Image: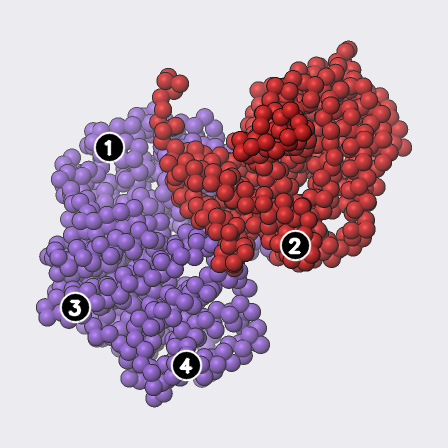
Chain colours: A red, B purple
Amino acid sequence: MPSYQAPLRDMRFCLYDLFDGDDLTSLPGYEDFSRDLIDPVLDEAAKLCEEVLHPINRSGDEEGCTFENGVVRTPKGFKEAYDLFRDGGWTSIACDPAYGGQGLPAVVNTLVEEMICSANLSFGMYPGLSHGAYVSLSSHGSDALKEKYLPKLVDGTWSGTMCLTEPHCGTDLGLLRTAAIPQEDGSYAVTGTKIFISAGEHDLTENILHLVLAKIPGGPKGVKGISLFLVPKFFVGDDGSIGARNAVACGSIEHKMGIKASATCVMNFDGAKGWLIGEPHKGLRAMFAMMNTERLAVGVQGLGLGEASRQNAVIYAKERIQMRSLSGTKAPDKAADPIIVHPDVRRMLLTQKAYVEGCRALAVWVAKSLDVAKKHPDAETRKEADDLVSLLTPIVKALMTDLGSEVANLGVQVFGGHGYIREHGQEQYVRDARIAQIYEGTNGIQSLDLVGRKMPDGAGRLLRRFFHPVSEYVAAKVEDEVMGEFVQPLAKAFVRLQQATAQVARVGMAKPDEAGAASVDYLRLFGLTALAYLWCRMAEVAQAKIAAGEDDAFHQGKIATARFFMERLLPETSARFSMVMAGGKSMMAFPDEAF
Amino acid sequence: MVDIAKVAVIGAGVMGAGIAAQVANSGTPVVLLDIVPRDLKEGGDRSAVAKGAIEKMLKTEPAAFMSKAAAKLVTPGNIEDDLALLADCDWIVEAIVERLDLKQGLYAKIEAVRKDGSIVSSNTSTIPLATLTGGLPARFAQDFCITHFFNPPRYMRLLEVVKGEATRADAIADVSRFADVKLGKSVVACKDRPGFIANRLGVMWMQAAVVEAFERKMDVEDVDQIIGRPFGIPKTGVFGLFDLVGLDLMPHVNASLAAALPEGDMFHEMNRPVPLVPKMIAEGFTGRKGKGGFYRVNREKGKRKETIDLATGDYRVTKKADVEAVKVGSRSLAKLFDHDSEAGRYAWAVMGRTLCYAALLVGDAADEIESFDEAMRLGYNWKKGPFELIDQIGTAEFVRRLEASGLPVAPILRTAAGKPFYQIVDGKREALELDGRHNVMTRPEGVLMLEDVKLASQPVLKNGSAALWDVGDGVACFEFTSKMNSLDPDIIALLQKSIAKVKRDFKALVIYNEGSQFSVGANLGLALFAANIAAWPEIENLIASGQQTYKALKYAPFPVVAAPSGMALGGGCEILLHSDAIQAHAETYTGLVEVGVGLLPGWGGCKEMLARWAKMPKLPKGPMPLLAQVFEMISTAKVAKSAAEAREMLILRPADGITMNRYRLLADAKAKALSMVEGYQPPEPPVFRLAGRSAAAALAMAVDGFWRQGKATDYDRVVSAAVAKVLTGADTDMLIELTEDDLYDLEREAFMGLVKTPGTLARIEHMLMTGKPLRN
C-alpha cells in the first residue's frame, strides 16, 4: 500500500520563508491570517488527507463509479468521507465570508488543494468542481441567484459542475449547439447534450448546480454568442427547500484511464429550466473568471500527484535492496545495498524532488500573487500582480502537469516491476496524472495562450512582470561569491529565454504558424527558467537560514537540490532554445499524405 | 506668361478667408475684402467682417495659416472703400454667396478697377461659367475662369479649374501654375458642367449611400464600415462625412445639382427624400457643428457615443460595426458584392451605381479618366479613384454586373472593351483615352515621383523596412517602407549600407518617401517589447548604432538632403537634423516628441538642437537663453505644425527650402542636393561649452514651478531632469569643451536610465494602446 505524509515542512518553507507569508496580514481583509491561524489549517488538512482521503484512493480506483438507471454511485467510503469533509468546513475555506465561506487566502487554499490531490485526486474533483461553479456564480450571478444558491454551494450541501464540452466541440467553444430559449417567466429552457462533465451526477450531495454554456437563438455567431446558465438538478423553493426534478439527467458515465472514482458524465438537458448568469452572450467572460483559477488548480494536481509518487519512491528506494553499489558495498549487513545507492536511482529521485519542490514554489508564488491582485490597497500593485498571474497561469497549468506526469512515471521506474503492478499504487499516479495534461485546456492550448495572448498583450507588459524581477535578480547576484554558482546558470537560461521570446514575438506576428510551432518548446523553456529563478531564491533563503544557525538536513537539501537542478535539469533549456530557434518549417512543410 | 505676385480674395467666408490664408502661406501678399457690416454702429470698423475672419482663422484648429508671419501678408478691407486695392492685383478670386445677381454686380465693380491682363475667378460650385459671364464685356470674359477650392483650402489639395469659351489659354496657365507651385494644389481641368467633377460624383455617391441605407433601415455604423475600408474610402465613411460637412447643406446641394442637371441624369433617381434628415435639421442635429448628426456625443450620459437609428430616428449607444460581408470581401470587391446579405447588396447598390455614374461622366464633366480619379482622391480623400476601383473589379466583370442589374453601360466602358483603364507598360503608367488607346501618363515639368521610379526600376538596395533608389543624375533616394515609416534596426542597417553605396556610386543622397507620414519615429512597439523582456543590451545597441549611423550620414563625403512631408517625429526629426539641408513640404509636422513617451532624443536630437541654437546670432549672450529654448522645445515635446513653424524652431535653417506642392518635393530636393555637389565639404564638427549642474538646477526649478501649478506631472519632472542633464552636459562647466561624441554618450546614458523606469514603460504602453500620451 502506498503511503502519504503531507510535506508541511516544505510548504511552510515556501509560504513563510520564500514568499514572506507573514505579510499576508498586511493585506486588507487578511488581517487575521497569521501563522497562528494558517498553521492549524494546514495541520488539520494534512490529517484529513492522510487519514480520511488517502486510505480510499486505491480502493476508489479499483471500484470506480457505477451507473445504473440514471443514478451514479461513488465508490465505497466516498460518501462518508465527503460528509466528514463537508462537516469539517473544507468546502468553504476559499469562499467569501458573505456567503458563509472562510475567506482563506488563495495561497493557503493552494497548499490544501495540493494535499487533497496527493491523497485522492478523484475525491478532490467533487469539491473542486463546486468551487469552480462558486467562482463563476459569485463573480457574475445576480444577487437573487447568489442569495438562493451560494450558501448551500459554499457549505457543501450542494455541489456544482461546469458544463462546457459537447460531443462535437471541446476546445472550440464557438461550435456549441446547446440552446437556451427565453421563457416568459424570465428563465430559459436549456436543451442539448454535454459530455465529459465531471461530478455531473453522484450520490454525495442532495442537489447539483450545473453551470451550462448555451446559445440564445438569434445571438452573435461563434464564441461571442455564448451565454452561461444555472441549471439545478432539483428546483429550489424560495425557502431553500428541495423541489421537483429538473429536466436534466445523466445518460452514461465514461470509462477512463484514470481518476476512476470521479464520475465523468454525459448530461442530457431536455428543456431544463435555467437562469442566466451575467449578461446574455457574455458567458465566456463569466466562464473565464473560473477558468483561470481552475487552470492554477489543475497545475496543482500535477504537483500533488508528483509529490505522492515521489514520497513512495524515496521510501521504496531506501528499503528495496538490490545489487551492490558500483563504488563498493554500502550495507554490508544486508544481502544487497538499498537501491538508493545507485546513480540512476539517485538521478530519478533528485529529478522528482527538484521538479516537485520547484513547482510548489511556483504554485505558491502565483497563488500569493493572486492574493495581492485581489487584496492589495494599491491599484498599480494589484495590476502588476494580476499581470504576473495571467502570464504564469498557462505555465503553471502546462509545466506543472507535464512535470507531474514525468515525476509519476519516474516513480514507477524506481519501483521497477513493482511499480507496474497495481498493488503499490505507483501506476495509479501515472494514470491519474495523465488527464491533467488534457483537461481545462490541453497543454498545447496553454502554450498557444502563452505565445498568442499573453506574450503580445500590452506589447509585452505581462512579460515585464517576470523578466524585470529576474533581470534585476541576475544583475544583483550573478557576481555573488556564494550565489554565483546558481545564478550563472540562471543567467544563461534567461538570456536564451529573452532571445527566444524576441524571436517568437517577431516571427509570430508575421506567421502565426511559426509561433504555434514554437509554443510548446517555448513554454517549457520559460517554465524551466522560472524554476531556475525559484531554485536560486530557495538556495539563497536556505543559505541565510544556515547562516542564522538553522543548519539542518532540510536546508542543506535545498541547496544541494538547487545545485542538481542547475547542473542536471536546467541544461534542457539549451535544447529547447535550439528547437524554438529552428522554426516550424520541418513540420509545416511536411506533406499530409506522407504522415 | 504673367507671374502672379499679388492676389485679392473677395468674400471672407470660410472658403474665401481660407483661400486668402493659403495665398499668404505661399508668401504672396493678398487683399481680403468683404461687405461693410449691415448693422454697423457709428464709428465701427467698416472692414470688421474681413478682419474678424482673419482673427478667427488665427484661433481655429487645424490652423489656416502656416505661421503668424503669413497672417501679416493679408490686408483686410471692404468692398465699398477698398476696391482700389484690386488695381495692382494679378488675380482676383471671388468667393461670395452663390447668387448670380450679387456676383455679377461685383464683377462689374471689379471690372472697373482691375488692371489689364489680371485674372478674375469665381469659387462657385453651382453656377455655370457661361451664366456668370453672361452679358459681361469681352474683356472680362477672356480673363475669367472658375477656380473651385475645397474646404479647408489649406489642407485640401484639389483645385478644379474651369475654362470658359472666351477665357484666354494663358490666363488658365498662369492661374494653374500659381495654384500648383505656390498654393500646392493639384489642378484638375473640368468642363463647365454642374458640380464639376468631385461634387458631381461625390454628391451622387453620398446621396445614394444615405437613400439606400435609409430605405433598407441599415445600421449607420455598418454602412460606414461597408462604404469605407473595402473601397479605400476614409473610415469616417458616408455618415461620418455628412456629420463633418453639415447635414443642413444637403438639401441645398441636392436641390441646386438637381436643378442644373438635365433630365435623364442618374442623379435624379437617387435624389429621393429621406424624411429623417429634414427632421434632424429642424431639431438642430446638423452634424458636428450642431448638436450632433448621425453620430453624437451624449454629454448628459457621460460623453456616451451614440448613433441615430435610421428606422426609428432615436439615438442609441454606438455599436462596433462587425459586418460579415466586409470580412469576407476584405480582399475582393466581387466577394463583397456577392455576399448574400443586405450588406453585400447594399455595397453594390451604392458603389456599383457610383462607379457606373463615374463612367457615364467621362466626356461630360471631363475627358480624362485620371481627372476623375485625382478629383476623388484629393477632393474626397479616397485612396483609389473610381476608375482605379473599376480596374480592381475588372472592366469586363464590372460591365457584366452593370448589365445584370440593369444599369447603363457608359461608352467609355464599351471603349475599354475589357481592357483595364490603367496599365503599366515598360515601367510606365498608361491611361485609357476616349479614343480607346492607352497613352503614357506624363508628369508636369518639375515633378518627379518616387512611385514612377519604382515602377521603372529595381532598388539599388533593399530590406524589409527601407530601400535605396536611383532617382537619376547621380542622386540616390533613401526610402522608408516600414509601417507608418517607423524607424527600426533594419532601417538603421540599410542606411549604414546606403552611405557606403552612395559614396561609391552616387553624387548625393535624398531622404524621402511617399508615405502619408515621413516617419512617426522609432518603432515603439519593438522598443517596448524589448524593454519588457529586459533586453537592455539590445536597446542600448540600437541607440548606439542609430547615433553612429546618423553621425556617418552627417559627415558623409556627399550632400544629404532630407525631404519630409507629413509627420517627422522623434527619430524622424533627428534624421532631418543630421542632414546637410532640408527641403520640406509645407505640410511638415516635426518635432522631438520623445518625452511624450517618457524618453528623450537619443539619436543626436539634443545635441543637434543645441548646436543649431548656439549658431543663432539673435539671442542675447550667455548660455541660458539658448539652453532654455532647446529645453522648452524638447521637454514639452513641441511639434511644428508646418514647415514654416519648423523654421521658427530652427529645425529648418535659413538655407533650407519649403515646397508647397507635395508632387514637387522630390524634384526640389534633388535639385537642392545637386546644387550642393560641387565643392561639397562635410560640416565642421561642433564643440559644446555647457553650463553643467548649476544650469540643470535652474531648469529643475523652472519645471518645479510648472509642477506646482499643475502644468507638469510627477513623471514630467523625472523626464525633464534627464533632458536637463543632457542639455547642460552633466558634470561639466563652461570651461570644458565637450565633443559631439560626449553628447551622444550623455544622450544614450540618459535614454537607458529612462527606458528602465516603470513610468516610461507606462507612457510607451499607453501611447501604443490609445494613441494618446499618458500624463503620469
* Residue B550 position in % (x across, y down): 28, 63
Residue that numbered label 1 is attached to: B413
Spatial CA span between label 3 and label 4: 54 Å
Residue A21 vs residue A88: left or right? left
Have a look at marks 4 and 1 and say if they share a chain.
yes
Task: Name the element at disc 4.
Answer: loop
Q: Which mark is residue A546?
A: 2
Q: Please give the name of the residue rendered at 75% of the width and 13% of the height, measured from the top-left corner.
A: A67
Q: Are marks 4 and 1 in contact (CB under 8 Å)?
A: no
What whole-number distance in Å separates the C-alpha atoms at marks 4 and 2?
50 Å
Mark pair 1, 2: CA separation: 90 Å
User: Under tag 3, what secondary structure?
Assistant: loop
Residue on which disc 4 sits: B692
Choose mark 4 or mark 1, whichever is in front.
4
Q: Quadrant of the C terminus of chain A?
A: top left
Residue B237 in percent (x, y) is at 43, 45
Q: Residue furthest top?
A: A69
Amino acid on which disc 3 is placed: Asp
- Position of B654 relative to A49 (above/below): below
SS at circle 1: helix
Residue B96 visible at all: no
Asked if residue A329 is positioned above or below residue B657 in the image, the reply reads above
Crowd rating for badge 1 (residues with CA inside 10 Å; few <14, some 14–19, many 20+): many
Please tell me which residue is depicted at 40% across the width and 43% down the height of the picture.
A503
**Residues at badges 1 and 3 in contact (C-beta under 8 Å)?**
no
Mark 1 and mark 2 on one chain: no
Chain of the residue where label 2 is placed in the rendered structure: A
